[in-house]
Amino acid sequence: MLNRIVVIGRLTRDPELRSTSNGVAVATFTVAVDRNFSNNRGERETDFIPVVVWRGLAETCGRYLSKGRLVGVEGRLQIRNYEANDGSRRTIAEIVADNVQFLSPKDSTGSGGGSGYTPDSDFDREEMTPLDEIPF
């Protein structure tokens, strides 16, 4: 059996880095990936894919990635269920990454993230769906 997924896209926000109760680092972020085709209105749509990284890779992503950075993510697709605050059952699909490639250049400070980085012109933040409007 095989469960591998590879995506290339831009971070929608800075990674959120935390530690488990056992001290294991975990980072989460969302990657915006444009579809290769247009819808019936001639517009290109975007998928927003949650990503989870663990241990040293989580610390590296938390330190060097920031909103707008272009990344390649490789890992496995994980589907999990949870109970929301309102008592309803929810399902989420996410990538558990074991490889993250930083594809865009570092910002002018050399730190790899922060306010000095300007994304490429093909990334339009104004047309992105806010994360709080995504159904999962």
Image (tube, rainbow, N blue to C red):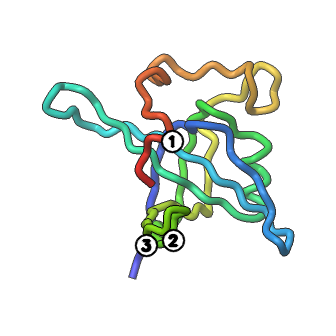
- The dot on residue 3 is 3
Q: Is residue 71 left or right of residue 130?
A: right
Query: Residue at label 1?
Result: 132
Q: Amino acid at mark 1?
A: Asp
Vertical placement of residue 49 versus 76, above or below: above
User: Looking at the image, is mark 1 or mark 2 earlier in the sequence?
Assistant: 2
Decide: few, some or many residues near mark 1? Use Cα within 10 Å; few <14, some 14-19, many ≥20: few
User: Looking at the image, is mark 3 or mark 2 earlier in the sequence?
Assistant: 3
Q: Is residue 96 left or right of residue 32?
A: right
- The dot on residue 13 is none
Q: Are marks 3 and 1 in contact (CB under 8 Å)?
A: no
State the CA–CA distance, disc 3 to disc 2: 22 Å
Q: Amino acid at mark 2?
A: Tyr
Residue at the farthest front position: 86
Q: Amino acid at mark 3?
A: Asn
Q: Give the quadrant of residue 67.
A: top right
Image quarter of the N terminus: bottom left
Query: Residue at label 2?
Result: 82
Image quarter of the C terminus: bottom left
